[in-house]
Image: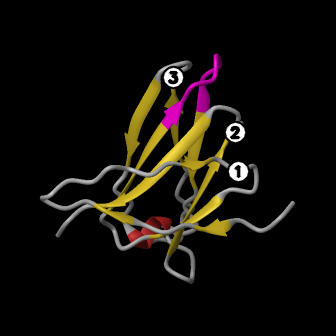
């Protein structure tokens, strides 16, 4: 497998944002995360897909935190996922890792909320 790609965040603003979607990759995707990132995920496939946001962080007592999964309905699935607290979701480079149960028909758009 190839390494996951680091994606560019699209910024939501008062003037509006026309989202540009990225096709899901079997290698997963790294997304810079400052805690104001949300991901819009679409699924046009006839099967439900699961999106996973990995949680490399742990609780204050050292307990592992379960990865966050979201189901994207079949055919016309369109969900929002996030925001993602950096202390739980970021790797050492300040990135969220996003993966998919299957990629056919799945696209997503990483967006940053204004703050």
Residue that lies at the very extreme toward the left in this rendered image: 14
Left or right, 7 with respect to 82, comes to right
Sequence-first tag of 1 and 3: 1
The segment highlighted magenta reads 42-49
Main secondary structure of the magenta stretch:
loop
Sequence-first tag of 1 and 2: 1
Q: Quadrant of the N terminus?
A: bottom right
Asked which secondary structure carries label 1, the reply is loop
Residue positioned 64% across, 32% down in the render: 105
Asked which secondary structure carries label 3, the reply is loop
Separation (CA) of disc 2 from disc 3:
13 Å
Q: Quadrant of the C terminus?
A: bottom left
Residue positioned 25% across, 61% down in the render: 113
Above or below residue 86? Residue 19 is: above
Is 44 in the magenta?
yes
Above or below residue 107? Residue 98 is: below
**15, 27: nearer the viewer:** 15
Disc 2 versus disc 3: nearer the observer = 2
Residue 52's x, y, as percent? Answer: 58, 47
Residue 25 circle label:
1
Local packing at callout 1 (Cα closer than 10 Å; few below 14, some 14-19, many 20+) is some
Separation (CA) of disc 1 from disc 2:
6 Å
Sequence-first tag of 2 and 3: 3
Local packing at callout 3 (Cα closer than 10 Å; few below 14, some 14-19, many 20+) is some
Residue 73 circle label:
3
Above or below residue 79? Residue 89 is: below
**2 and 3 marks in contact (CB < 8 Å):** no
Is 86 in the magenta?
no
Residue 103's x, y, as percent? Answer: 69, 39
Separation (CA) of disc 1 from disc 3:
18 Å
According to the picture, the residue beneath numbered tag 2 turns out to be 103
Residue 100's x, y, as percent? Answer: 65, 43
């Amino acid at each position: 497998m190839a390494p996951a790609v680091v994606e560019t965040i699209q910024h939501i603003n008062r003037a509006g944002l026309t989202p540009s979607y990225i096709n899901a990759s079997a290698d997963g995707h790294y997304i810079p995360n400052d805690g104001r990132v949300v991901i819009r995920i679409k699924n046009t496939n006839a099967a439900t897909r699961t999106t996973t946001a990995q949680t490399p962080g742990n609780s204050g007592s050292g307990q592992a935190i379960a990865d966050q999964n979201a189901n994207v309905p079949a055919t016309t699935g369109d969900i929002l996922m996030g925001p993602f607290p950096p202390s739980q979701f970021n790797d050492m480079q300040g990135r969220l890792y996003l993966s998919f149960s299957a990629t056919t028909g799945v696209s997503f758009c990483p967006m940053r909320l204004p703050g």
